[in-house]
C-alpha cells in the first residue's frame, strides 16, 4: 500500500462547529505532516510529527489542534474557525530520518461559513 | 537558507510538442530537489527527485530533469506533451539543515492545447 488517505474529501462547517480531519498511511513512515493550500498557491507547512511526537509547529493558531494517535494516523481537530481558514488541507508522510521525500494525500477541501 | 524560483508562472504548449519548466534553487547545504505535479482538486504527486546521485533524473510519465550545480538549476522536461499533463507543477528543495521542511516554488501552470 503506497498511498496516503484522507477523510472527508469535502467538509463544510460553521464558525462555531468542531470537526476533525483524518489522515492515514500504511507505508511504515515515521513522519507525518499537515499542510494548508490556498487556491493558486503552493502548500504551506502547518505541523510535523516525527515518531509520533510534534516536532514542528509553524506558529499555527490554536483553533487548529493536531493529534497523532499512532504511527499510521494523523488527525487535525478544528474549532472556531474563520472563513479565511477555507482551503485544501493536505496530509503527507515520509520515512523520516534523512529521507525527506514526502508522499501526499488527496486532501480535504474545507469551507468555513 | 533554501529557496526556489520557478521562472514561468504559466506555460502553454501544443499536444505532442516538448515541455520545459524552469527552476532555479538556492541552498547552503547539499540539496534534495523534487518536482511535484498537482491536477485540479487533487493532492501532489511526486514526479521525480534528485538526491546527489545521477544528475539526469528520470521520473514518471516521461518526465526528466537535469541537476546543474554550476547554474543552480533543476529544469523539468518532457519530449512530447499529452493532454493529461495539464496541471500545476511545483519545484521543491529540501536540505539536511531544514529537516521536515520542503521549500516550494510558486508553481507553474501548464496548459496543453490540442
Image: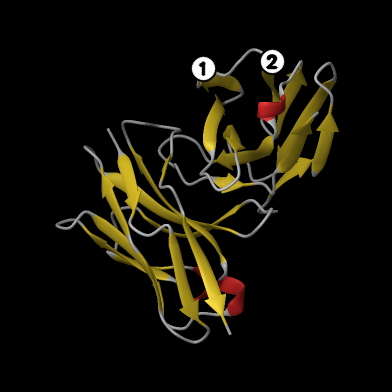
In the rendered structure, find residue A79 and report the number of the disc placed on it. none
Closer to us: B82 or B32 = B82
B13 over B99 or under it: above or below: below
Which residue corresponds to the image point at 42% horizontal and 57% vertical from the top-left? Answer: B9
- Picture quadrant of residue A111: top right
A3 over A111 or under it: above or below: below
Q: Position of residue B101 (x, y in %)?
A: 43, 34
Could you tell me which secondary element the residue under label 1 belongs to?
Answer: loop
Which residue corresponds to the image point at 84% horizontal and 24% vertical from the top-left? Answer: A14
Closer to us: B84 or A94 = B84
Q: Chain of mark 1?
A: A
- Picture quadrant of residue B28: top left
Left or right placement of residue A110 versus residue B102 in this view: right
Location of mark 1 (residue): A59
Distance from label 1 to label 2 (Cα)?
11 Å
B49 over A28 or under it: above or below: below
Residue A8 at least partly seen: no
Which residue corresponds to the image point at 69% horizontal and 15% vertical from the top-left? Answer: A63
Closer to us: A68 or B47 = B47
Q: Position of residue A46 (x, y in %)?
A: 56, 27
Q: Position of residue A43 (x, y in %)?
A: 54, 40
Could you tell me which secondary element the residue under label 2 belongs to?
Answer: loop
Q: Residues within 10 Å of mark 2 (few under 14, many from 20)?
A: few
A13 over B52 or under it: above or below: above
Q: Position of residue B4 (x, y in %)?
A: 33, 46
Which residue corresponds to the image point at 46% horizontal and 83% vertical from the top-left? Answer: B80
Closer to us: A45 or B100 = A45
Q: Quadrant of the C terminus of chain A?
A: top right
In the rendered structure, find residue A63 and report the number of the disc placed on it. 2
Q: Residues within 10 Å of mark 1 (few under 14, many from 20)?
A: few
Q: Chain of mark 2?
A: A
Count of numbered badges drawn on the protein: 2
Amino acid at each position: 500500500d503506497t498511498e496516503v488517505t484522507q477523510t472527508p474529501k469535502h467538509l463544510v462547517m460553521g464558525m462555531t462547529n468542531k470537526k476533525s480531519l483524518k489522515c492515514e498511511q500504511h507505508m511504515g513512515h515515521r513522519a507525518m505532516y499537515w499542510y494548508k493550500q490556498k487556491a493558486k498557491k503552493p502548500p504551506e507547512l502547518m505541523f510535523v510529527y516525527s515518531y509520533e511526537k510534534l516536532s514542528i509547529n509553524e506558529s499555527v493558531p490554536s483553533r487548529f489542534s493536531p493529534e497523532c494517535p499512532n504511527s499510521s494516523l494523523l488527525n487535525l481537530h478544528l474549532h472556531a474557525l474563520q472563513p479565511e481558514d477555507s482551503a485544501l488541507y493536505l496530509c503527507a508522510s515520509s520515512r523520516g530520518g534523512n529521507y525527506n521525500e514526502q508522499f501526499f494525500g488527496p486532501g480535504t477541501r474545507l469551507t468555513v461559513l | 537558507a533554501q529557496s526556489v524560483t520557478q521562472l514561468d508562472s504559466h506555460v502553454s504548449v501544443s499536444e505532442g510538442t516538448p515541455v520545459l519548466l524552469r527552476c532555479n534553487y538556492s541552498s547552503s547545504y547539499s540539496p534534495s530537489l523534487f518536482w511535484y505535479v498537482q491536477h485540479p482538486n487533487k493532492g501532489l504527486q511526486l514526479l521525480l527527485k534528485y538526491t546527489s546521485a545521477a544528475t539526469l533524473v528520470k521520473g514518471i510519465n516521461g518526465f526528466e530533469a537535469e541537476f546543474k550545480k554550476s547554474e543552480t538549476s533543476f529544469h523539468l522536461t518532457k519530449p512530447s506533451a499529452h493532454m493529461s499533463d495539464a496541471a500545476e507543477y511545483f519545484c521543491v528543495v529540501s536540505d539536511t539543515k531544514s529537516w521536515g521542511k520542503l521549500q516550494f516554488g510558486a508553481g507553474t501552470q501548464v496548459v496543453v492545447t490540442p
